[in-house]
């Protein structure tokens, strides 16, 4: 990751004389999944597991299509459950490598697994989908009424598989097959383990209230304590997309702040999914009629119109088509701004009174002209390599690639 150092005045000026010959190759997202074999389907779950100690098969591959051994699954489940791996009594299994003994000891002590025999854990064996279902149901204390959906689930696994089904953790490998005796692959393991953690967390809390802070920010008041919030865990009606989710207060009541797509003034949005499950009852908010309406700089307080591209706007998420102003009427953004480029080649004539983040896929040649950023300029969220030209771009903070 490259950064421009601040000068003595705390400002960085990238002038046209510099930009004329300024070429930056290969701008890539620093937050992008580092494993080349992890598709969008697995990214959130694999990211969660790597935060809890998971490693790939190599530096560049996670091995989503490879089977996972029982010993490796044991370490990851113990880490995710935050079990005490130091004080658990010896399991009595003789085939567990030293690196995993604490995890296996803890899993047995908690009644999550009993091994293959009294003395064998089966460390080198691949864990099956049925075995993992047992571990997850017991470890995360999942419940659900018993289902007869799958024809390959014996009585031994029925309670565990039914709990995973009830909590929308898995749908099996087909409409009628869970794949009980099939080895589970590392990618699918990640999804089931991640969703089980979410199901455990979100089943213990309750959303109480929604509040629109501005046209791109919603706060959710939740009864109980959460340790994780992700955009995918909050879904609304009306085409409102959640871009970011972060916990800003966490005690007896948790406050989660959501950055959303631009809310329509006067529109009512209903929360439909909380965690993995549909929301029971009515939980909604209405955006105030005048929230985030652009103003005409010549007539403060008067709503802007398409004929005048300038004016003041709130911080939030914007498309590349909406971001730029003109030399006569620059756009002024009061707060942090994220711009989804979607193959846009030019951004210009804007002032951001906060941080500016460019995201999405830009055109191969991207030009920024006559832009002032009073915070940081973050280019690390771009998902493709670009040739970048900056002309009369002033950044008060740091520019991150």
Image: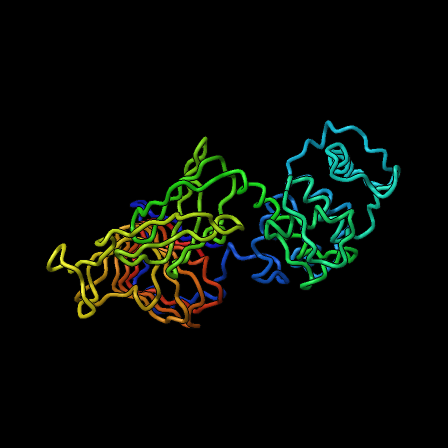
Q: Is residue 86 above or below residue 181?
A: above
Q: Quadrant of residue 42?
A: bottom right
Instruction: Give the image location of residue 197, x and y in percent.
Output: 60, 44
Q: Is residue 362 above or below residue 79?
A: below
Q: Residue at x 50, y 38 (%)?
A: 205
Q: Is residue 256 left or right of residue 154?
A: left
Residue 227 visible somewhere in the drawing? yes
Q: Residue at x 47, y 52 (%)?
A: 273
Q: Nearer the viewer, residue 332 or 270?
A: 270
Report the coloring of the rendering.
Answer: rainbow
Q: Nearer the viewer, residue 342 or 189?
A: 189
Instruction: Give the image location of residue 137, x and y in percent.
Output: 68, 43
Instruction: Give the image location of residue 341, x and y in percent.
Output: 39, 66
Q: Is residue 121 left or right of residue 310?
A: right
Q: Residue furthest left?
A: 299
Residue 16 visible somewhere in the drawing? no
Say which quadrant the C terminus sits in: bottom left
Q: Residue at x 38, y 56 (%)?
A: 357
Instruction: Give the image location of residue 139, x and y in percent.
Output: 68, 39
Q: Nearer the viewer, residue 394 or 49?
A: 49
Q: Residue at x 75, y 51 (%)?
A: 130
What is the count of numbered marks?
0
Q: Quadrant of residue 200?
A: top right
Q: Quadrant of residue 327?
A: bottom left
């Amino acid at each position: 990751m490259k950064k421009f150092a601040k000068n003595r005045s705390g400002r960085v000026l990238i002038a046209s004389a510099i930009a004329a010959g300024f070429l930056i190759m290969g701008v890539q997202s620093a937050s992008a999944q580092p494993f080349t074999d992890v598709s969008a389907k697995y990214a959130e779950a694999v990211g969660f597991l790597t935060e809890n100690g998971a490693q790939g098969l190599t530096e560049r591959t996670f091995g989503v299509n490879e089977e996972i051994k029982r010993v490796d699954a044991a370490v990851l489940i113990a880490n995710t459950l935050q079990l005490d791996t130091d004080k658990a009594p010896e399991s009595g299994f003789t085939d567990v490598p030293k690196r995993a003994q604490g995890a296996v000891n803890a899993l047995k002590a908690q009644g999550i697994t009993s091994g293959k025999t009294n003395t064998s854990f089966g460390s080198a064996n691949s864990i099956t989908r049925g075995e993992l279902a047992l571990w997850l149901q017991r470890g995360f204390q999942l419940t659900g009424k018993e289902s007869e959906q799958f024809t390959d689930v014996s009585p031994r696994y029925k309670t565990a598989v039914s709990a995973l089904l009830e909590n929308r953790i898995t749908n099996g490998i087909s409409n009628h097959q869970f794949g009980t005796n099939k080895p589970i692959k590392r990618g699918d393991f990640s999804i089931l383990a991640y969703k089980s953690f979410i199901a455990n967390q979100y089943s213990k809390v309750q959303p109480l209230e929604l509040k629109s802070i501005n046209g791109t920010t919603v706060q959710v008041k939740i009864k109980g304590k959460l340790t994780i919030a992700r955009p995918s865990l909050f879904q609304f009606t009306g085409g409102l997309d959640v871009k970011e989710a972060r916990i800003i207060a966490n005690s007896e009541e948790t406050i989660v702040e959501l950055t959303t797509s631009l809310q329509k003034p006067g529109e009512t949005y209903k929360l439909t999914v909380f965690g993995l499950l549909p929301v029971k009852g009515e939980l909604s908010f209405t955006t105030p009629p005048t929230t985030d309406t652009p103003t005409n700089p010549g007539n403060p307080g008067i709503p802007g119109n398409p004929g005048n591209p300038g004016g003041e706007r709130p911080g939030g998420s914007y498309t590349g088509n909406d971001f730029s102003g003109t030399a006569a009427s620059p756009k002024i953004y009061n707060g942090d701004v994220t711009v989804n480029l979607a193959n846009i080649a030019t951004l210009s004539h804007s002032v951001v009174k906060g941080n500016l983040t460019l995201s999405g896929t830009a055109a191969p040649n991207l030009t920024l002209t006559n832009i002032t950023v009073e915070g940081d300029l973050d280019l690390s969220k771009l998902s493709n390599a670009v040739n970048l030209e900056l002309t009369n771009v002033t950044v008060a903070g740091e520019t991150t690639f």
